Image (cartoon, rainbow, N blue to C red):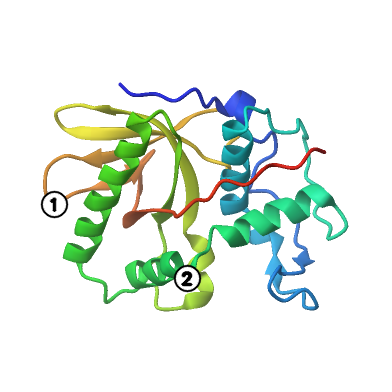
């Protein structure tokens, strides 16, 4: 049962991604516009930043409530890491897999391949960020309905492979994603169906000190 030392109570953020107030923030690529929507969450930024601190051997700042303001340095860091998590390659796959025309074969083949990549990283004792494809729509504006999490360990049993994850929607606890080992593959997280999974392209960043 390969496990990393990532503990959501220590390396995870103390605030939840699911309860930010509505705020229009500046985007890193368009600094003079306020197109960002904090109520849609910062899950990719929270996952990437938590992994940054973990790999640097540092605990995340123990902040209970995030100040959603363009003048707050921690908020800007999380926004930057959120946008770092959206590479053109990843976004193209997100849209392809959420589209109603995406075939079940494509969803299953991609998920199986990326599961193996996630397990390979965990075998090296390195947490792995990945995306849950939850949306089922042609509308690209709903890409934010997909969700980014961090795999921290796994178990393989006869019927399924279970990934232990840090989910920024839930503080101080592990969540679990189950991946059936028989075809057709079924993926779910605590009873919620998941269309597909996608391992994100992560590059470590030296975390700032707050």
Q: Quadrant of the N terminus?
A: top left
| Residue 204 visible in the snapshot | yes
Quadrant position of residue 137: bottom left
Q: Position of residue 191 (x, y in %)?
A: 35, 41
Which quarter of the rendered picture does the C terminus lie within? top right
Residue in front for this viewpoint, 11 or 195: 11
Please name the residue that numbered disc 2 is placed on.
Answer: 88
* Quarter of the view holding residue 3: top left
Q: Is residue 162 above or below residue 24?
A: above
Give neighbour class at mark 2: few <14, some 14-19, many 20+ (Cα, 10 Å). Answer: few
Above or below — where is 203 with respect to 178? below
Q: Position of residue 33 (x, y in %)?
A: 77, 78
Q: Is residue 67 above or below residue 86?
A: above
Q: Residue at x 78, y 47 (%)?
A: 74
Count of all numbered marks drawn on residues in the image = 2
Residue 46 left/right relative to 26:
left
Q: Nearer the viewer, mark 1 or mark 2?
A: 2
According to the picture, the residue beneath numbered tag 1 turns out to be 184
Q: Position of residue 199 (x, y in %)?
A: 38, 51
Check contact, mark 1 vs mark 2: CB within 8 A: no
């Amino acid at each position: 049962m390969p496990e990393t030392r990532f503990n959501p109570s220590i390396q995870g953020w103390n605030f939840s991604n699911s309860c930010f107030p509505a705020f229009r923030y500046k985007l890193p690529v368009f600094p003079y516009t306020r197109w960002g929507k904090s109520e849609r969450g910062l899950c990719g930024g929270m996952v990437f930043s938590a992994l940054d601190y973990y790999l640097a051997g540092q605990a995340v700042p123990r902040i209970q409530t995030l100040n959603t303001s363009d003048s707050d340095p921690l908020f800007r860091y999380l926004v930057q890491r959120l946008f770092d998590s959206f590479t053109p390659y990843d976004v193209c796959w997100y849209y392809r897999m959420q589209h109603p025309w995406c075939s079940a074969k494509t969803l299953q083949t991609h998920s199986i391949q990326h599961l193996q990549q996630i397990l390979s990283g965990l075998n090296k004792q390195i947490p792995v960020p990945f995306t849950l494809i939850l949306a089922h729509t042609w509308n690209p504006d709903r890409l934010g309905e997909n969700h980014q999490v961090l795999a921290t360990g796994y178990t393989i049993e006869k019927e399924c492979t279970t990934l232990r994850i840090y989910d920024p929607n839930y503080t101080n606890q592990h969540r679990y994603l189950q991946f059936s080992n028989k075809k057709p593959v079924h993926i779910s997280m605590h009873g919620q169906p998941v269309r597909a999974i996608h391992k994100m392209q992560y590059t470590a960043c030296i975390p700032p000190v707050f």
